[in-house]
Image: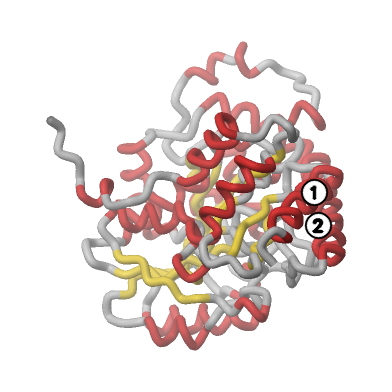
Amino acid sequence: MVKVNKNITDIKTPPIDYFNNLLRIKSNNKFKSISFGHGIPMYTPNNYYKFSKNPLLDDSSYKYTEIRGDQRIRQYISTKLNSKCSFPVKSDNLIITSGANSAIFKSLFLQLQYGDEVIIPSPVYFNHTMAIEMIGGTVVEVNSIAESGFQLNLKGIQNKINSKTKAIIINTPNNPTGATYNNDDMKILAQICDKKNITIVLDYTYEDFSYNLNYNPLASFEHLKNLIIIGSFSKTFGITGLRLGYICASKSIIEDLCKIQDTISICAPSISQNILLQLLFNENDAIKMNFNSASNSRDKLIECLNDSKILNWQATNGAFYAFIKIPNTENTWDFCEKMIIEYSLLVLPGSIFGEHWKSYIRIAYGAVSPKEIEEGVQRLYNQISKTT
């Protein structure tokens, strides 16, 4: 019998699949199923682009690219980052990866040895904690300040830094809260990490989904010395299934990251890169469609939650998530199961984003219409009204 690494067996099974399967198997057929579960945008390239070339007919789609990925994509990223950064970013600073989760894992695997600690503001994105624990690191959660819209708890972070701290993961705009972290706090954190030689791993997956029009967390950093930027094409272009992300880092560690990339995946999928190369010419169309859709759903969510009187959300300004406290509920895991079984509505329990958040739920509104938002909030209200 295969003996499984304890680092793997001790990790909880990915929760979204559990709730998706529950919705598929046990939903109430009196109601049309609505999913506020997966964090995906509304539109795919089929909605905003007509392909001029069929990537299936391109021989290069079936062959390896170089380990770092297509030079043209890396040049595109460097140009985009240079418009936001005060330091230069070149294509040599970049590696195209099989999604942002892969980029996070490789960036952590590069740094961590057994017992090293990684600080994460909580609520956390559970794939971040899973990666740390698989590698043998220790997750140190620092609760964000719910009353301030889940902003960074700088004092709490500073108090947790010690000789074992190797990295801090910052995810802004944030999943699951939608928070966009204050730039002044980000600058202070960058200075602390520079002084103590701690790496900030900046998960910038939702860079194109900020409702603060001038939000730019990259402006808080002066160099790449202690910074690794993780990016994704999935949300911006509506290509979550193509699995494309990137790592931006100092040249001094790129070669070592290439060793990890080559061992795990060799390169990002060639066919996905060829598809993306065409979509890059229509970036504005993709951003406009998915951003406007998410913005409209967000506006409707704010309206419906305000009208409900019992569901309060201090609206956050990024991504497409709302993290909401359910009144008189200490265990939203059970609540979320009931919402599926009784109302065919999928929301995720707060406990999967940190033990402190058991009375919260996450609503993902990126891929649902305003009408579905209205209906979903009504179902939540109906269930909560039974217990209040």
- Residue at 66% from the left image edge and 34% from the top image edge: 28
- Give the residue type at disc 2: Leu
Question: What residue sits right under mark 2 in the picture?
Answer: 301
Question: What residue sits right under mark 1 in the picture?
Answer: 373
Q: Is 109 positioned to the left or the right of 291 in the image?
A: left
- Which comes sooner in the sequence, label 2 or label 1? 2
The residue lying toward the viewer, choosing from 271 and 44, is: 44
Image: 188 above or below 308: below
Image: 241 above or below 92: above
Q: Is 320 positioned to the left or the right of 109 in the image?
A: right
Crowd band around label 1 with a 10 angstrom C-alpha radius: few (<14), some (14–19), many (20+): many
Observer able to see residue 288: no
- Residue at 50% from the left image edge and 83% from the top image edge: 191
Q: Quadrant of residue 74?
A: top right
- Secondary element type, mark 1: helix
Q: Quadrant of residue 372?
A: top right
- Residue at 62% from the left image edge and 76% from the top image edge: 146
Crowd band around label 2 with a 10 angstrom C-alpha radius: few (<14), some (14–19), many (20+): many
Mark 2 to mark 1: distance in Å? 6 Å
Q: Is 313 positioned to the left or the right of 11 in the image?
A: right
Q: Residue furthest left?
A: 1
